[in-house]
Amino acid sequence: MQYLVDSLLGILAVANLTRILSYDKIMQPVREYFGIAHDDEGYKVTMFENESAVKNFIGQALFCFRCTSVWAGFFVAGLALFTPRLYRFFTLANAGSYFASLTDS
């Protein structure tokens, strides 16, 4: 039963982390640093090529919602494998944040 709970918390944590990285306003300056342009409402519009291959790769990963979720999944899985206590704290905090975001209007 504990594995099921941990898995569900991990899924919610990945969903929340992906939303934060791809859409939330708090990460907009980071996305702009990696070449993602936003319109006046803060929605991603286009991506500009960067001079650095690393910045370009990270910018493409942040621009694509599915790509961001894969990398977020790798991060959360790494936490589960190497630091289980930090994983539990991280997943509980992100799951709570995810449920709180569902109630926002």
Image: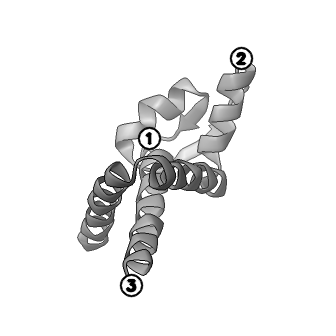
State the residue position of label 2.
Answer: 52
Q: Nearer the viewer, residue 78 or 100?
A: 78
- Residue 96, given in percent of the width and then of the height, sits at 26, 65
Left or right position of 1 against 104: right
Q: CA distance from mark 3 to mark 2?
A: 46 Å
| Kind of residue at badge 1 | Asp
Q: Looking at the image, can residue 25 be seen? A: yes
Q: Which mark is residue 1?
A: 3
Task: Answer few, some or many: residues within 10 Å of disc 3's Cα (few below 14, many 20 plus, some between 14 and 19).
Answer: few
* Marks 1 and 2, the one that precedes in the sequence: 1
Q: CA distance from mark 1 to mark 2?
A: 27 Å
Name the residue located 60 percent from the left edge and 55 percent from the top edge: 65
- On residue 40, the disc is 1
Q: Given contact means CB atoms under 8 Å apart, are the residues at marks 3 and 2 in contact?
A: no
Coordinates of residue 58 in the picture (x, y in percent) = 64, 33
Q: Position of residue 63 (x, y in %)?
A: 62, 44
Decide: few, some or many residues near mark 2? Use Cα within 10 Å; few <14, some 14-19, many ≥20: few
For disc 1, the neighbor class at 10 Å (few under 14, some 14 to 19, many from 20) is few
Label 1 or label 3, whichever lies nearer to me, is 3
Q: Is residue 5 above or below residue 68?
A: below
Q: Which picture quadrant has residue 42?
A: top left
At a point 48% along the width and 59% down the height, the residue shown is 14
Residue type pointed to by label 2: Ser
Q: Is residue 24 above or below residue 103?
A: above
Task: Looking at the picture, tell me which residue is in the foreground, 93 or 18.
Answer: 93
Helix, strand or loop at label 2? It is loop
Earlier along the polypeptide chain: callout 1 or callout 3? 3
Q: CA distance from mark 1 to mark 3?
A: 46 Å
The image quadrant where one finds the N terminus is: bottom left
Tag 1, which secondary structure? loop
